[in-house]
Amino acid sequence: MNKPRYKRPAAIDLGDLHLSIVRGPNAEGRWYWRARDADRATVWTGWATRDEAAREGAAVLAKPRPQSTATFQTGAASTMGEVLSAWWSVIEGDTALRSSTKRGYLSRLLQLRRHLGHVPVSGMNRAALQGYLTKRMEEGAALRTIRGELISLRHAWRIGVERELIPNRPLPTLTLRIDPKVYVANHRTPTPDEVTRALAELPSELALTVQLLVATGARVGEVIGLRRDDLDRARGTLRLDGKTGPRDFPVTEGLLSLIGDRLDGTDAPVLYFDVKEPRSLVRVQLLRACNRAGVPEFTPHGLRRMAVDRMARAGVEPSVAASITGHNPNVMLKHYRAVSDEDLCLAAQQADLGWFARVLSPARENT
């Protein structure tokens, strides 16, 4: 079976503009590029080939550069609170970042400022970082969350050095190792029966959301972001748009039976949530529904794994399945395919791994 292979393109330098790959490729072979100017501010992001990214970079350079909303005063910062404020000015003034991304950075800022804002710049050493780690763990923060906060802290430190707010010295490194016995990520793939039982414990709109996740194998953000005009009736496809870019999902009768009455061609959302963070709501309510139904917990992403697993067991070619779910084929096979004991036994039988023993048996009998 031939699998598409895409060689990672080299970065592009256009004067003061640097374009590099953030992630990818997607099913179309495009990579997600990010362009940064001399101040390390992001001025463009998007899915593109290398040639397309170069053209986008040239277009950025041709545009008049807007005045930055961030203001800095060159001079020594005495506390980490001042360094963090300078970093937040860069984040807040970055027009290429989504509002949801900025909210995530703001959450990190609040934690960093609360514990480290008063710390003198000269006192930022390994002991200070270890103290931050200890306090956050005592508060119940996950190691993955703390790791993200420390990444933002390093970014803030780099901004401080570049703006000459702090001395040009490296921030100590604190390695975080996640103990699998303490922190267990829920990568469980549910069974159809477990999903059915959990659905019965959910209110109608949340139940519909879960049904859409099952029917499409999409990411929860893609389903929540569905609009009523995303249906192309002529082609029989539904446009899903997520972190790997837009893709067309083939509409099935089951999918139309779920939301056909809502696809009226307007730009209104398909699903309605009276909360600011519907993704968190879906995840929390699904876990609670699992507990009420008495089934092992699974997450919205577990439904995506289930869709991949069902396509693999049905013999769908990996490249086709990856196009449907918006995956890289290798990533999909490595992280999403659930291998059971039955799969292992069947593979051994299909490959006839015992052939060598049969070949040797006559030789032993003749001796």
Image (cartoon, rainbow, N blue to C red):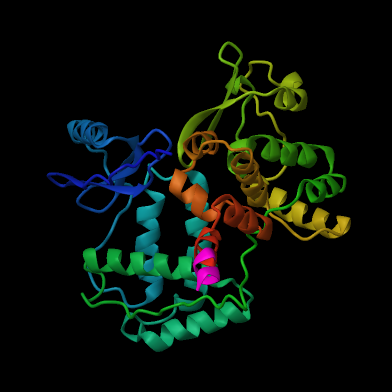
Can residue 364 be found in the magenta stretch?
yes
Q: In this view, does 85 lie to the left or right of 159?
A: right
Q: Is residue 84 left or right of residue 170?
A: right
Main SS category, magenta section? helix
Q: Name the foreground residue: 209 vs 347.
A: 347
Question: Is residue 240 visible to the viewer in this orientation of the structure?
Answer: yes
Q: Residue at the far front: name it.
A: 366
| Residue in the picture at 35% in, 66% down | 156
Q: What stretch is highlighted in magenta?
A: 362-367
Q: Residue at the far left: name it.
A: 15
| Residue in the picture at 51% in, 50% down | 333
Rendered view: 185 above or below 289? below
Q: Name the foreground residue: 216 vs 361.
A: 361
Residue 47 location (% of width, % of height): 36, 36
| Residue in the picture at 60% in, 17% down | 236
Can residue 246 be found in the magenta stretch?
no
Residue 226 location (% of width, % of height): 62, 31
Q: Name the foreground residue: 294 vs 81.
A: 294
Rendered view: 338 above or below 262? below
Residue 263 location (% of width, % of height): 68, 20
